[in-house]
Each structure stands twice: as structure tokens, then as C-alpha cells.
Amino acid sequence: MTPLLQVENLSKHYGAHLGCGDVSFALWPGEVMGIVGESGSGKSTLLNCLAGHLRPDAGRVLFDTREDGPRDILGMTEAERRWLARTDWAFVHQNPRDGLRMNVSAGGNVGERLMAVGARHYGDIRAQASDWLERVEIDVGRLDDRPRAFSGGMQQRLQIARNLVTGPRLVFMDEPTGGLDVSVQARLLDLLRGLVRRLGLSAVIVTHDLAVVRLLADRLMVMKDGRVVEQGLTDQVLDDPQHAYTQLLVSSVLQV
Amino acid sequence: MIEIAGVGKRFVLHNQGGVALSVMEGAALRVDPGECVALTGASGAGKSTLMRMIWGNYRCDTGSIRVAGVELCRAEPRAVLDLRRGTLGYVSQFLRVIPRVPTLRIVAEPLLAQGMDEDAALARARALLTRLNIPAPLWSLSPTTFSGGEQQRVNIARGFIQDWPVMLLDEPTASLDAANRAVVLELILQAKARGAAILGIFHDADARAAVCDREVDVTGFTPAMVSA
């Protein structure tokens, strides 16, 4: 078996400041990896480098493409990367407004991604959009409403539907439950977990919430000041943290 | 099915003056298929620590832990995950769940994760919950508001829904009444009969005597604590 994503010595600086440094890991099909760390630790920089939104200074990001096997995404043309972003990849933003078109109906938001990969039949697109609204627990009667009329939790679920409709193999998530009420978070976590399992997705999830990674991630990477200080099985890193910073992080969580 | 040799473990508490605690040294044991072995020793002697090292949420510093032929000491996450998917089951003392997920789903989840058909998985979950005396009206509710004993039985149902070749049981009969305790012991005997290798911690001596073939006292693996 080949890793779906293989990252080798990835580094990104902002001027003299280190964004993330010397990151390496392999993500295997069906695995969910969490990246935790405080604000400024470099986790979002890393995620954006992996997803092709930022250009790293050094390193390689090999993605196992359907057609040609592992290819360095940094060596791809912009058009090739965009095609991947629309088909095999998905990116769920923390703020649904960054991932949705707010002036287009819910159905249109989901349908747009289908059309971008060549779907043309209106009836089919609408049927698939309805199906996906149901899967993310949005009333199909809201198909023609614009997302601005939705609650934050609904917008986030719509963003997930829009991302998953094309059957991606790799999903990047940047704080997918951030900014939501805890009750809404729990519902979204349950939904994400179910989808990831049923669709056999691989995912990289950036969050500062240890409870989120405990429930969603198989593996965990802990970042501090742009460096990976520890990585391993999620429950091992959380229950038996080795690095001083991870120990601090785990012991700082309030028990409810 | 479980083979442990020369296993040692240290905790280094970086944020508490870098104190290094050596909690285990030279741990060794073996559990064969169809056998149930009890870990014994006083509270704090390291029974749960050893069990967690086999499950993989505690890192093992030295030695070898093999489960179904797979070396778990310093193994890649992928190897441990793979073992947990089909071979190694663990009934922990506490139930950890996503808040709003119904009990029936929580119990069926290990089977669903393996790709079993949903109806078949839910049917098995219903049968086990019935056997463990969880009233049907509770099945559609999240167990987060259940009593301690009910939560534990949900946890046991989840642990026994799959025919794991290797099982770790951490106090499976604690906080259960006599009737439910009997059900759990029966489940353990059935698992043994089908050939499962079981390693358990049983506070309750009668329960231990009823299901276990041998005992391993972990006190022998506990290094003398340096006095403060």
C-alpha cells in the first residue's frame, strides 16, 4: 500500500520568522490525523502548505493521484492543483463564509462543485444536492434558501456537504468546530465521524481542541513554535505525553 | 496471543521538576488462546499501566509486547490501529462517547467500523443490551446521563459485540449488581470457549476465581520506589 499523502521535510518561513519547520509524516488511506498546538504554533501554515494554498520554501508533498500515483504537488501546474482541489481534495474552513458562496442557494453551493467537475444535468445535480443536504441533516425544504439565512452550525454542515459531494479522498479541516456552541459542536463531531468512517476518507484536522482530536483523529501531531514536538497514536499522545509542552497542554484542560 | 518480556516503563514529569518515576521493570507474561489470566497486585502496583501498554495508549520504553504476533513496543500508529480494528478489544473502566450518539449506535460501532451491514450490527447490539438488562427505552438515548452501572454495562456490550481474538478487561464487574455480574462472567466464559485470549483486572476475588485460569502478580514488576 502507498501512503495517500507523504510529507518530507516541509518548511515555510514568513521573512525571517519560521511558519513551520522540517515537518515529515505519511498519511495512509482511511487515517485521520489531528494537528494540535496553540495559536501561532504553525499548524494552519502547515495545513495550507499541504493543501496547496501556500508555497513552502523547502520539502516535498507527495499525493497519491488516481492516474499517475504519487506526485509532488509543488511540481504540479496551478491548473492541476485546482483540479485536485475540486475533485480528490476537500478543504473545510473554520468560518463557513470562507468556504461557501453566501449569495447562492444551498443547493447551488453543493451543485456548483459538481458542475466544476463536469455535471450538467440539472435534475441529477439537484437530486444529489438534496441527498447531501439530508446526509448533513439539513431539511431538504431549505434547498433554495441562501446560507446567510442559516445558523452557524447549519452553514458549517452545508460547507461539509459542498466539500464531500464530489467524493474526495482527502479532507483538510481547519478548526471545523471552532466558533460553534458546544451542543452544535457535538452534533457536528458525530456527523463528521460518521461520514469519515462511511466514506473511508483520510483527513488532516487542525484544531486547538483536544476533545475534538480524541474523538475524530487516529493519530496526533503536536506543534509548538513551528516545530513538531511529538507525534503518535492519539490516545497515546494524550494519555502518555512525552514532551514537556504536550504534558502542559494535556494537563491544562479543564475537567468538566 | 499475548507475549510480554522485559517490559519497562518510566514517566518523566517535565512540568513537575522533571521527576522521573520508574513504574515498571522486567514485566513478563503470556496469555494463550482460550485462557483468562488475571493481573493482581495492590492498587498502584501497575496493573492498569501494564494493560494500557498492551492497548498502546501508554508507551513502552523497553522490552517487547507481542499481540497476535505483532510487536507493539515502539510500533507505528498504523500497526496498532490495525490490531485494534480486528484483533484486540479493550473494555476500559469508563465509557467515553460523543455526547448525543444513541446507546444502540455506540454499542454497534465497532462492528460498523469493520464494515458490517448496519441491520446486522444493530441486531447484535440489541441482543447484547437485552442480555445486559439495559431497558429498551434507553437504547435511543445517549448514555451520558445513565447511572454508573448502566454506563459500565453499555461499555461491556460495546466491548463484547465483536469476537475479538484478544481481550483486555479492566474491572469489568466493578459497580455491577449480582445479576449483571453473572451475565458479564458468562460473556467472559463464552469468549474463552471460542478461543479468546483474555487478560483482566478483577477487584472482586469471586469473579476472578470464576473465570480466570491463572494469576500474575504485577508487584514483581514494580521497581522499589525511591523514597522522597
Image: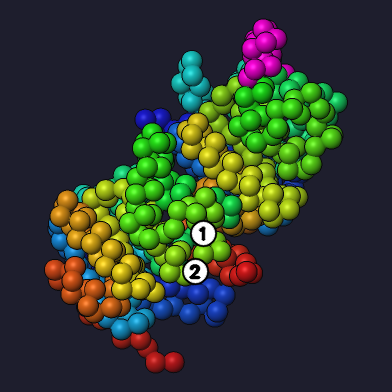
Residue A14 makes an appearance in the image:
yes
* Residue drawn at point x = 33 percent, y = 67 percent: B180
* Residue drawn at point x = 38 percent, y = 48 percent: B125
Residue B70 percent coordinates (x, y): 25, 49
Say whether residue B82 is left or right of residue B206.
Answer: right
Q: Which amino acid is tagged 1?
A: Pro
Instruction: Name the residue tied to disc 2.
Output: B147
Residue A72 bears which disc, if any?
Answer: none
Q: Tell how many labels.
A: 2
Residue A90 makes an appearance in the image:
no
Label 2's element? loop
Chain bearing mark 1: B
In front of the other: A149 or A81: A149
Instruction: Name the residue tied to disc 1.
Output: B143
In front of the other: A152 or B131: B131
- Does residue A125 show up magenta in the picture? yes
Q: CA distance from mark 2 to mark 1?
A: 8 Å
Label 1's element? helix
| Rendered view: A164 above or below B63 | above
Quadrant of the snapshot with the N terminus of chain A: top left
Q: Which amino acid is tagged 2?
A: Ser
| Rendered view: A117 above or below A1 | above
Residue B61 percent coordinates (x, y): 35, 65
- Does residue A3 show up magenta in the picture? no
Q: What are the residue bounds of the magenta stretch?
A: A112-128
Residue A32 percent coordinates (x, y): 51, 42
